[in-house]
Image (tube, rainbow, N blue to C red):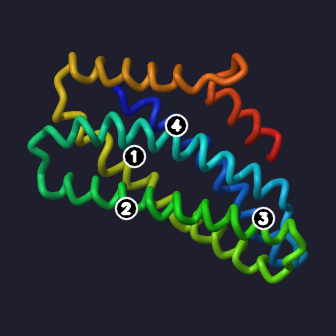
Amino acid sequence: MLPIGPLMIEHRLIERMVSLLEKEINNIEVSKKANSDFVYAAVDFFKAYADKAHHGKEEDILFKELGSKPLSAEHRKIMDELVAEHVVARQSVKGLLEANQNYSNGEIKALPAIASYLKTLVGLYPPHIQKEDKHFFIPVMDYFNEKEQQAMLKAFLDFDKSLIHDNQTIHEKYREIVEKCE
């Protein structure tokens, strides 16, 4: 398996959560209320799974290794865009958490901010994932020989093992959370 395989598998779970965000946006628009429990679950998902586990492997392993390679101008540009998009995602999740805390404390005027941050995430992730899956991951594998690719795959697996909590992998935990929310 190429090291990008686990990253692409993770994208499928992120896409499922993004679908749930879209449903919450519709719920907010119709009912003029947010499901704070769901929003907290989504914040947890994006902080722990999408950012720490997924973006962590991308930035701390793949992008770091690519930084030592003679990347084409196009690949360097895409990698820089991906990192910038990760920053936007982090800022949006932070803002979503703050808005949801305010809403949970009775500040109804925080509802538009919740909807706005959800819309930002829904607008960000599908093209971000497509950019990685279709235009970046596969081509950049050519910068690595077989031995380097296998070492990277092992580093990804070791990274994931470091995220085990209560005898449950991060992938099991967040797959269960998404399934419950679905």
The residue type indicated by label 3 comes to Gln
Mark 1–mark 3 Cα distance, whole angstroms, equals 34 Å
Task: Please tell me which of labels 2 and 1 falls first in the chain.
Answer: 2
The residue tagged 2 is 84
Between 86 and 27, the one lying in front of the other is 86
Task: Please tell me which of labels 2 and 3 falls first in the chain.
Answer: 2
The residue tagged 3 is 101
Dots 2 and 1: beta carbons under 8 Å?
no
Mark 3–mark 4 Cα distance, whole angstroms, equals 24 Å
Looking at the image, residue 90 sits to the left or right of residue 174; the answer is left
Looking at the rendered image, the disc whose residue lies closer to the viewer, 3 or 4, is 3
Looking at the image, residue 78 sits to the left or right of residue 87; the answer is left
Task: Please tell me which of labels 3 and 4 falls first in the chain.
Answer: 4
Between 168 and 10, the one lying in front of the other is 168
Tell me the number on the disc at residue 35: none
Give the residue displayed 38% in from the left and 40% down from the top.
58
The residue tagged 1 is 133
